[in-house]
């Protein structure tokens, strides 16, 4: 059971985040009206309409006002790739349909004239991608607006890093793939808590318990680095966006096949997950940073915390910082019971340890 994205977007938005308009609405506007509105992105939701009005699309591109064409239909983007005459700085962005399925029908290497962006949640389902594959930064908010901002400071996939992530996924899947979805999520949360230290850019990290300074020993710690799931998975440190997207990659792939996505709100990124036909929240960043059993003066867990696993909308509202601004399926109001998680943890402790985690990646102290 999956929840599809909204089928319609608003006609025009003047928000600084939502400079986008439906193609079917744009073609009604004169050149002067186009210039008078804040528009940068074209959303196309119907292939037959696109074919019948392709000359209008080329006219819009020639105005120089648009550089991004967005659709949740890869066939629309393929048609544009094959027929658009002016390819100057044209980026084609595929939006997420929130389904977990084989994406072999998406062939990024066929897009040689335009730049193709893919949702990060699709990456491990696509058979082949190009090095430095562009990552889609688009998510929908509650009103159906596009949200064309970078939620993760993370633009590209590097093939060598992706190969290592795939190897990690396969290694974990050999141990975990035969468990239920909630058990897989617990196991992956435990894995990340055992490995990852929360580190913000410039080695200054703010948490509910204070401000921490890390010593990266000269290693660059920029916003892009700490926001990358590659850094979280391969170097074992990073920010909430990197941690949430790392959680998604480890679970949302052909081996583990768990329907989980990253969502943005309140300047924070966490996950929404489908368990037994119902959606819940997971926040592995808070499981690390608000873990009662951390290493001294460090945002690194010593043992497993389940406080922010499978919680509902009521708890999200109560703890704040978890009100989605981007598209999110309807989440259950109540949490999955803590006792149920503890029973699962006891069962899973037969295959992996939930305590005695390794120490922090970087030396750290509270300031």
Image: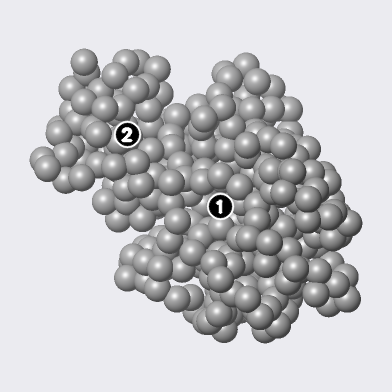
Instruction: Identify the residue at image location x=30%, y=55%.
Output: 234
Instruction: Identify the residue at image location x=69%, y=72%.
Output: 77
Q: Position of residue 323 (x, y in %)?
A: 64, 28
Res. 227 visible in picture: yes
Foreground mark, 1 or 2, reads 1
Scheme of colours in the image: one colour
Q: Position of residue 367 (x, y in %)?
A: 21, 15
Q: For numbered disc 2, what is the local secondary structure? A: loop
Q: Position of residue 15 (x, y in %)?
A: 68, 35
The answer to whether residue 282 is left or right of residue 365 is: right
User: Could you say which is closer to the camera, residue 288 or residue 113?
Assistant: 113
Residue that carries the numbered disc 2 in the rendered image: 200
Q: Position of residue 214 (x, y in %)?
A: 19, 31
Res. 256 visible in picture: no
- Of callouts 1 and 2, which one flags the residue occurring earlier in the amino acid sequence? 1
Q: How many marks?
A: 2
Q: Quadrant of the N terminus?
A: bottom right
Q: For numbered disc 1, what is the local secondary structure? A: loop
Q: Is the residue 96 above or below the residue 268 in the image?
A: below
The answer to whether residue 278 is left or right of residue 350 is: right
Q: Which mark is residue 264?
A: none
**Extreme residue toward the front, this view:** 32
Residue that carries the numbered disc 1 in the rendered image: 137
User: Could you say which is closer to the camera, residue 361 or residue 263?
Assistant: 263
Q: CA distance from mark 1 to mark 2?
A: 21 Å
The answer to whether residue 291 is left or right of residue 136 is: left
Instruction: Identify the residue at image location x=36%, y=55%.
Output: 230
């Amino acid at each position: 059971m999956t929840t599809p994205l909204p089928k319609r977007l608003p006609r025009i938005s003047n928000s600084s985040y939502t400079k986008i308009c439906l193609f079917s609405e744009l073609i009604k506007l004169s050149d002067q009206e186009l210039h008078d509105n804040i528009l940068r992105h074209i959303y196309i939701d119907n292939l037959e309409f696109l074919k019948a009005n392709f000359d209008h699309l080329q006219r819009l591109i020639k105005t120089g006002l648009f550089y991004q064409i967005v659709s949740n239909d890869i066939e629309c983007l393929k048609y544009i790739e094959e027929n658009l005459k002016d390819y100057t700085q044209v980026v084609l962005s595929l939006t997420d349909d929130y389904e977990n399925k084989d994406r072999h029908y998406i062939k990024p290497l066929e897009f040689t004239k335009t730049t193709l962006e893919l949702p990060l949640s699709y990456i491990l389902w696509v058979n082949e991608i190009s090095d430095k594959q562009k990552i889609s930064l688009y998510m929908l908010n509650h009103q159906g607006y596009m949200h064309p901002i970078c939620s993760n400071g993370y633009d590209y996939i590097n093939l060598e890093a992706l190969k290592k992530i795939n190897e990690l996924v396969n290694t974990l899947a050999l141990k975990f793939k035969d468990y239920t979805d909630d058990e897989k999520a617990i196991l992956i949360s435990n894995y990340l808590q055992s490995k990852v230290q929360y580190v913000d850019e410039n080695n200054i990290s703010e948490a509910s318990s204070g401000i921490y300074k890390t010593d990266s020993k000269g290693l660059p710690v920029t916003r892009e680095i700490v926001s990358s799931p590659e850094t979280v998975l391969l170097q074992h440190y990073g920010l909430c966006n990197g941690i949430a997207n790392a959680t998604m990659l480890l679970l949302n792939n052909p081996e583990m096949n768990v329907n989980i996505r990253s969502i943005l709100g309140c300047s924070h990124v966490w996950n929404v997950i489908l368990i037994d036909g119902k959606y819940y929240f997971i926040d592995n960043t808070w499981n690390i940073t608000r873990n009662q059993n951390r290493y001294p003066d460090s945002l690194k867990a010593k043992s497993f915390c389940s406080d922010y696993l499978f919680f509902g909308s009521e708890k999200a509202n109560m703890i704040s910082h978890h009100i989605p601004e981007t598209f999110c399926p309807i989440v259950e109001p109540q949490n999955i019971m803590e006792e149920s998680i503890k029973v699962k943890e006891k069962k899973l402790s037969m295959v992996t340890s939930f305590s005695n985690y390794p120490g922090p990646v970087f030396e750290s102290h509270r300031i």
